[in-house]
């Protein structure tokens, strides 16, 4: 992180995902359609976390969901809130 953007001091690989105001004639492309970094937890979360949110109201069934171990650890931490 040798260079600061003046907006947010963040990881260099995350810079294309930050929306910035543009000056006239200056185009700043966003890279929102790229995949997330493996193992990183972001606001986009993961599919397992989304499945948990959707399946939690169904209490009279067993939920069997397969996903990466990192996702399971991330959502297990939410139980203790």
Image (cartoon, grey):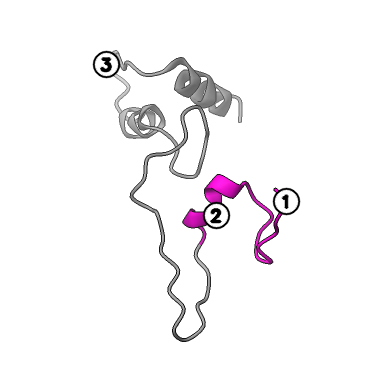
Spatial separation of the CA atoms under disc 1 and disc 3: 51 Å
The label shown at residue 61 is: 3
CB-based contact (under 8 Å), mark 1 and mark 2:
no
Q: Residue furthest left?
A: 61
Magenta segment: does it hold 17?
yes
1 vs 2, front mark: 1
Residue at the spot of label 1:
2
Q: Main secondary structure of the magenta part?
A: loop
CB-based contact (under 8 Å), mark 3 and mark 2:
no
Q: Nearer the viewer, residue 40 or 63?
A: 40
From the top left corner, tell me how far across and down residue 53 is, in percent.
38, 34
The magenta region covers 1-18
Q: Secondary structure at mark 2?
A: helix
From the top left corner, tell me how far across and down residue 27 is, in percent.
43, 74
Q: Nearer the viewer, residue 58 or 68?
A: 68
Residue at the spot of label 2:
15
């Amino acid at each position: 992180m040798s260079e600061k953007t003046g907006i947010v001091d963040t990881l260099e690989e995350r810079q294309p995902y930050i929306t910035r105001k543009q000056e006239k004639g200056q185009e700043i492309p966003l890279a929102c359609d790229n995949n997330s970094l493996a193992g990183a937890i972001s606001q986009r979360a993961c599919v397992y976390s989304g499945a948990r949110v959707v399946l939690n109201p169904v209490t009279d069934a067993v939920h069997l969901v397969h996903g990466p171990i990192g996702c399971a650890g991330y959502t297990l931490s939410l139980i203790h809130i």
